[in-house]
Amino acid sequence: LAEHDGADPEDAHEVLTRPEATWLWVDTAAAVADHGEAPLLVRHLESAVQATVPALLDEVRAVGHPRTVQVLVALAAAHPDPALAKAVRRAAFQVHTGGS
């Protein structure tokens, strides 16, 4: 879409607002999770615009994507770091229960 609007494809990430980029990250992660690509899902963390996992989790919880809980649960199950997996599971629970 960015290229269609005349932007350089390499700069497409700069066209999206932060919430749009977060929504796209969740949407892409949902597609990866649907195909059972656990290692790719873990690597997908690197493509997030947020500098840290806690910042990503805060923004993912706030963006309101309908697949957020499923993505976070899949990411928690796939991630080899127990502490990170626990934080991701906690975020999934908070989204599921409507907490923050």
Image (cartoon, rainbow, N blue to C red):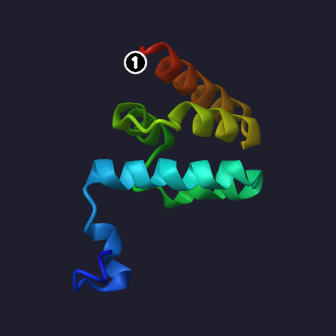
Q: Is residue 90 left or right of residue 60?
A: right
The quadrant holding residue 49 is bottom left
Residue 34 to residue 11: above or below: above
Q: Is residue 92 visible?
A: yes
Q: Quadrant of the N terminus?
A: bottom left
For label 1, the SS is: loop
Q: Where is mark 1, residue-wise?
A: 100
Q: Residue at x 59, y 40 (%)?
A: 71
Identity of the amino acid at label 1? Answer: Ser
Q: Is residue 33 left or right of residue 99?
A: right
The quadrant holding residue 77 is top right
Image mark count:
1
Where does residue 47 sit, x and y in percent of width and height?
A: 51, 61
Where does residue 87 sit, x and y in percent of width and height?
A: 58, 27
Q: Residue at x 43, y 39 (%)?
A: 65
Q: Residues within 10 Å of mark 1 (few under 14, many from 20)?
A: few
In front of the other: 30 or 78: 30
Residue 8 to residue 94: above or below: below
